[in-house]
């Protein structure tokens, strides 16, 4: 009997003491999390008040929605810094019961976790509910529901609106893995002379973070309908954009696939569009160093000149490791006809890193094959000639005549290959030589400067 009583008292002490112990851990981690939010996001979050309790704590936060920091170059000082005050309640584990309604089913609001936090906002401009659960294994589950969000834009005297914004996320211990989905029923973005309206948009991801703080995995953006009204009306329906990464040894490959079911400008429907682009053999170590350096310089608000000096050697080293660019699919429908083709660019791996950008061309090989409508080339050239030809020259020779004369000359030279109502071109670059349909072409001088800083005393 005494042993049972001792065990019961011991369990009671643990049950009552653990929430307080967890509370101190939660407070420490919570302040650290706010620091990371301020460092890694455009928001500024300030803890106005933090009240530590035995079974729960409360935090009052002030969130600044102005993404421009005080020292950021180009910041508009006249822009109002909109602020939102939030109340967050943090429950301490291990047994968390959140309901205060006796009629609720027991267990519905019962959670076994290290800690749990809730935010509830019910304001005219923002309605928001969030729930974060901190597990004992180090995982974090987070979800939010925002039925409506209204953000005033004073310059346009209109409002930025989001309807039915939802999200669910999972993060593993030490944020090594993350996955989730965020969606919105409608987003209305006011423009200077119109609106951009997006409906049924979602973003889902499953990512892993490597030792260089670089995230790789799968991402997908879906947009049911996008309408841009700004003079002309542009409408895009059923858009799917995916980005998938693959790791082989120390190299990263990423494939971007963009598909559109319908692309309209005013009353003209251009149909389906599809592009597939792959970047291969990116050295993860060099890419991670480049990303970390760029991120650090962004946090320090370094000027562009300093970024160029510091990042150029890393960029050259990344190119020296060898890269393959493959535009495997281009299938675009236009008012002139179909544009179809593919292109690739290979930069060979070098034993010693490049020190100047122009030397990269020595190890570069490229090729491209495209078929495009003759009407497209005719219209582009005629528009250009109309802008360049003087009134006197127009009286002598019309732009349409100049277009025909030049295209006929290019066909005779072999630079254009007629195929019915289309033209075909084949481009090859190798050993610093450019071939257009097998014909040598002069390479224009590129304004590429030395990557090394110039010494004024030399």
Image (spheres, rainbow, N blue to C red):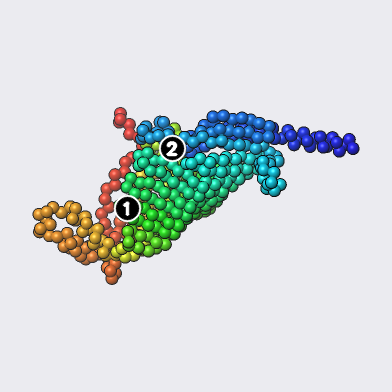
SS at badge 2: loop
Of residue 320 and residue 86, the one placed in the foreground of this image is 86
Of residue 125 and residue 190, the one placed in the foreground of this image is 125
Q: Could you say where residue 200 lies in the image, as x and y percent from the top left? A: 47, 55
Q: Residue furthest right?
A: 1
Q: Could you say where residue 228 lies in the image, as x and y percent from the top left? A: 36, 53
Dot label at residue 392? none
Answer yes or no: do the residues labelled 1 and 2 have beta carbons within 8 Å? no
Rendered view: 388 above or below 370: above
SS at badge 1: loop
Q: Could you say where residue 10 lies in the image, as x and y percent from the top left? A: 80, 35
Q: Residue furthest front?
A: 103
Q: Could you say where residue 385 lies in the image, as x and y percent from the top left? A: 19, 56
Quadrant placement of the C terminus: top left
Q: How many marks?
A: 2
Q: Is residue 265 visible?
A: yes
| Residue at left offset 34%, top offset 49% | 194
Given this view, does label 1 or label 2 mark the residue nearer the observer? 2
Q: Quadrant of residue 371?
A: bottom left
Q: Which residue is mark 1?
A: 432
Q: Which residue is mark 2?
A: 67
Q: Quadrant of residue 135?
A: top right
Compute the Cα span from label 1 to label 2.
45 Å
């Amino acid at each position: 009997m005494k042993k049972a009583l001792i065990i019961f008292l011991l369990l009671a002490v643990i049950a009552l003491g653990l929430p307080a112990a967890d509370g101190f851990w939660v407070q420490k981690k919570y302040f650290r999390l706010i620091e990371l939010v301020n460092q890694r996001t455009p928001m500024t979050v300030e803890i106005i008040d933090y009240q530590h309790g035995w079974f729960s704590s409360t935090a009052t936060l002030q969130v600044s929605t102005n993404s421009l920091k005080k020292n950021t170059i180009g910041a508009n000082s006249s822009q109002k810094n909109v602020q939102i005050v939030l109340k967050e309640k943090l429950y301490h584990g291990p047994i968390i019961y959140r309901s205060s309604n006796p009629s609720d089913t027991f267990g519905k609001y019962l959670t076994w976790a290290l800690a749990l936090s809730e935010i509830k906002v019910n304001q005219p401009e923002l309605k928001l509910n969030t729930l974060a659960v901190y597990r004992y294994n180090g995982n974090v589950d987070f979800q939010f529901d925002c039925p409506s969000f209204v953000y005033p834009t004073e310059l346009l005297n209109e409002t930025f609106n989001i309807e039915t914004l939802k999200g669910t996320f999972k993060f593993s211990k030490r944020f090594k893995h993350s996955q989730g989905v965020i969606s919105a029923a409608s987003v209305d973005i006011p423009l200077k002379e119109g609106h951009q309206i997006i409906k049924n948009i979602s973003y889902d991801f499953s990512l892993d973070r490597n030792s260089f703080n670089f995230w790789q995995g799968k991402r997908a953006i879906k947009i049911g309908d996008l309408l841009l009204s700004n003079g002309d009306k542009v409408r895009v329906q059923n858009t799917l954009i995916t980005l998938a990464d693959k790791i082989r040894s120390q190299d990263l490959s990423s494939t971007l696939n963009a598909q559109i079911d319908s692309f309209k400008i005013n009353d003209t429907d251009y149909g389906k569009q599809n592009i597939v682009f792959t970047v291969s053999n990116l050295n993860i170590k060099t890419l991670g160093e480049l990303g970390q350096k760029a991120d650090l310089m962004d946090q320090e608000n370094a000027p562009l000149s300093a970024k160029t000096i510091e990042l150029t050697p890393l960029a050259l080293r990344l190119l020296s490791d060898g890269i393959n660019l493959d535009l495997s699919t281009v299938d675009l429908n236009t008012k002139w006809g179909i544009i179809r083709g593919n292109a690739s660019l290979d930069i060979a791996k070098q034993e010693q890193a490049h020190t100047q950008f122009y030397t990269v061309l020595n190890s570069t090989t490229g090729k491209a094959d495209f078929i495009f409508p003759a009407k497209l080339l005719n219209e582009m050239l005629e528009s250009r000639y109309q802008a360049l030809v003087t009134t006197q020259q127009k009286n002598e020779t019309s732009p349409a005549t100049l277009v025909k004369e030049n295209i006929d000359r290019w066909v005779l030279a072999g630079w254009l290959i007629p195929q019915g109502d289309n033209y075909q071109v084949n481009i090859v670059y190798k050993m610093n030589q450019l071939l257009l349909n097998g014909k040598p072409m002069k390479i224009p001088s590129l304004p590429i400067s030395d990557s090394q800083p110039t010494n004024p005393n030399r």
